[in-house]
Image (spheres, grey):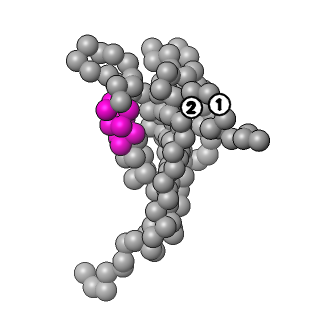
């Protein structure tokens, strides 16, 4: 029995892992748009587009939710999700094209990323 997000009709789920950098991301795509909400906690939250989830704002739905690693740097992955959605013509029609709404949240795991990817300089 499939009791994962992929069991929900209309949702697409993708994931990427970068083993060298020890980070990755998961995206939940809602081609028809979906009403979403959020509860942001923690002393240093990293988010993008979550204010749109407030019911008093004008965007009634989101087209994707991104959960990513890489601290604030990881939030850039939302741009790639937006490009993919735009290529598929998923988003709000704004006459000159579509604007996909992508909300994102990030985890801080840079301690591992910095040690694996960014080599310390021996001298300055």
- Give the residue number, with chain letter if any, for mark 1: 8
| Relative depth, front residue between 33 and 7 | 7
Q: Is residue 113 visible?
A: no
| Relative depth, front residue between 17 and 9 | 9
Residue contact at pointers 2 and 1, CB within 8 angstroms: yes
In the rendered structure, the answer to whether residue 121 lies left or right of residue 1 reads left
Quarter of the rendering containing residue 1:
top right
With respect to residue 76, does 84 lie above or below? Answer: above
- Give the residue number, with chain letter if any, for mark 2: 11
Magenta-drawn stretch contains 22: no
Quarter of the rendering containing residue 98:
top left
With respect to residue 81, does 9 lie above or below? Answer: above
Residue 7 in percent (x, y) is at: 66, 35
Residue 10 in percent (x, y) is at: 57, 27
Residue 123 in percent (x, y) is at: 27, 85
The secondary element bearing badge 1 is classed as loop
Look at the image and give the residue range highlighted in magenta.
Answer: 79-87
Residue at far right of view: 1
Give the tally of numbered discs. Answer: 2
């Amino acid at each position: 029995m499939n009791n994962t997000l992929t069991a929900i009709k209309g949702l697409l789920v993708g994931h990427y892992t970068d083993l060298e950098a020890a980070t990755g991301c998961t995206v939940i795509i809602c081609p028809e748009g979906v009403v979403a909400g959020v509860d942001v906690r923690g002393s240093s939250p990293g988010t993008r587009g979550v204010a749109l989830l407030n019911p008093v704002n004008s965007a009634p739905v989101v087209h994707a939710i991104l959960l990513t690693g890489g601290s604030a740097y990881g939030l850039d992955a939302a741009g790639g999700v937006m490009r993919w959605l735009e290529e598929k013509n998923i988003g709000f029609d704004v006459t000159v094209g579509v604007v996909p709404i992508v909300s994102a949240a990030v985890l801080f795991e840079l301690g591992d990323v910095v040690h694996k990817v960014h080599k310390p300089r021996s001298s300055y």
